[in-house]
Image (cartoon, rainbow, N blue to C red):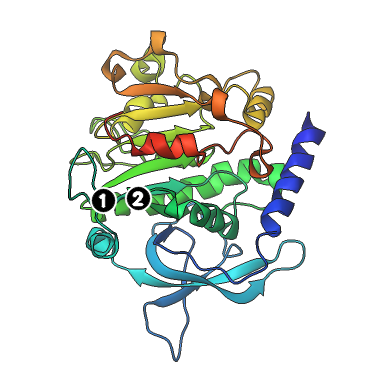
């Protein structure tokens, strides 16, 4: 199994690399917790650069909203781990909704005839580099007239399985700390959240406690209101029992994640799962048989009472088909069926 997974990862990287021959620019906005550096003399102070070789830190505290993100043509690092250097312009988070409203076409739908596009913040998972995530999001940016896809980037290793635990123990907590201030600053933004794979671990640690006396994760304060309309957990690399009754009633605050995650959504938490997901099968072998949430979804019979009607399962198995970029059956979050589901705001 491990040989199959490693070969599939290599083929996936080759497939992504085949699309990277031309200079790239992202059509919308980008959020990153990777540290940015000013371009310096001759450039506006708001113009910055970033790349995958800038190391993440467990104590990161800042994230930035960027626009006009473009591949500068420069690279850093040595082959085969060269990384492009991106340039972008820093945007105050509080201005993001107004900018989206001004730049986005009005759409006509049955909920509101003059509804602007809603932001869909998309958090990547393990072993995902800025260039591949930006390109993946850009490919799907125009597929919906109702959603403005905003990539959310955090530092992640690029050496496959060797970086798994370092991503989880160092980069994920740092990203969670960095994204927390944006929950308040961007509170005026109409948005939903999509987290893929280990991106759900970022979500788990970012979510503030559901009651002030609990300090699970890294957040120490309670939000005044849920920051997202809906939360979509795709191929979630977190425990399968995260929403269970026992997990959320236990006296250990470190287990109290399910209700915290639910507190991030005004409407519902959508658990998008597929039993054909190969990396999550491998995760089960690594974690002594413990299933991942993204394999079979939440156990609705054992759901915590406070989460009934709040957490819903979405079985993606029937449309999780093999493609060049989904050769591990793990990356179905931008399938056409998924896009349509995100558009169903009353789902």
**Residue placed at 71% from the left, 59% from the top?**
18
Residue 287 horizontal/vertical position (percent): 64, 24
Question: Camera-side residue: 296 or 156?
Answer: 296
Residue 137 horizontal/vertical position (percent): 50, 53
Give the vertical position of 147 relative to 256 (above or below): below
Say if mark 2 contacts mark 1, CB within 8 Å.
yes
Q: Residue furthest top?
A: 301
How crowded pointer 1 is (Cα within 10 Å; few <14, some 14-19, many 20+) is rated as few
- The residue that disc 2 covers is 145
Q: Is residue 52 visible from the viewing direction of this image?
A: yes
Q: Residue furthest right?
A: 3
- Precedes in sequence: disc 2 or disc 1: 1
Q: Is residue 176 visible from the viewing direction of this image?
A: no
Give the vertical position of 24 relative to 118 (above or below): below
Distance of label 2 from label 1 (alpha carbons): 7 Å
Q: Is residue 39 left or right of residue 78?
A: left
Secondary structure under the numbered disc 2 in the rendered image:
loop
Give the vertical position of 231 relative to 152 (above or below): above
Q: Is residue 50 left or right of residue 230?
A: right
Q: Quadrant of the N terminus?
A: top right
Residue 75 horizontal/vertical position (percent): 65, 73
How crowded pointer 2 is (Cα within 10 Å; few <14, some 14-19, many 20+) is rated as some
**Residue placed at 37% from the left, 42% from the top?**
193
**Residue placed at 44% from the left, 49% from the top?**
143
Question: Camera-side residue: 295 or 206?
Answer: 295
- Label annotation for residue 107: 1
Q: How many marks?
A: 2
Q: Residue furthest bottom?
A: 42
Q: Quadrant of the C terminus?
A: top left
Give the vertical position of 143 relative to 51 (above or below): above
């Amino acid at each position: 199994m491990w040989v199959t997974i490693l070969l599939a990862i290599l083929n996936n990287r080759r497939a992504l690399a085949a699309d990277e021959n031309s200079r790239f620019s992202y059509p919308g906005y980008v959020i990153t917790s990777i540290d940015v550096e000013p371009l310096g003399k001759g450039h506006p102070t708001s113009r910055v650069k970033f790349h995958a070789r800038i190391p993440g830190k467990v104590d990161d505290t800042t994230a930035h909203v960027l626009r006009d993100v473009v591949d500068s043509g420069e690279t850093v690092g040595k082959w085969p781990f060269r990384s492009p250097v991106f340039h972008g312009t820093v945007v105050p988070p509080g201005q993001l909704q107004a900018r989206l409203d001004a730049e986005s076409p009005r759409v006509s739908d049955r909920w509101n005839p003059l509804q602007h596009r809603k932001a869909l913040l998309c958090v990547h998972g393990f072993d995902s580099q800025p260039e591949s995530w930006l390109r993946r999001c850009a490919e799907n940016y125009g597929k919906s007239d109702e959603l403005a896809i905003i990539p959310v980037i955090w530092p992640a290793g690029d050496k496959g399985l060797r970086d798994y635990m370092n991503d989880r123990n160092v980069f994920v907590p740092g990203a969670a700390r960095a994204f927390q201030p944006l929950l308040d600053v961007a509170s005026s933004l109409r948005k939903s959240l999509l987290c893929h794979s280990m991106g759900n671990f970022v979500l788990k640690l970012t979510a503030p406690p559901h009651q002030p006396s609990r300090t699970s994760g890294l957040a120490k304060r309670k939000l005044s209101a849920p920051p997202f309309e809906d939360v979509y957990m795709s191929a979630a690399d977190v425990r399968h029992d995260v929403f269970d009754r026992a997990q959320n009633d236990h006296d250990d605050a470190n287990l109290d994640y399910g209700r915290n995650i639910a507190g991030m959504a005004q409407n519902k938490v959508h658990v998008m799962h597929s039993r054909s997901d190969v990396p999550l099968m491998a995760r089960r072998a690594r974690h002594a048989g413990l299933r991942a949430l993204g394999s079979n979804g939440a156990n609705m019979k054992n759901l915590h009472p406070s989460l009934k009607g709040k957490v819903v399962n979405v079985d993606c198995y029937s449309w999780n088909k093999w493609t060049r970029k989904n050769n591990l059956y793990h990356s179905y979050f931008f399938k056409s069926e998924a896009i349509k589901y995100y558009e169903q705001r009353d789902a």
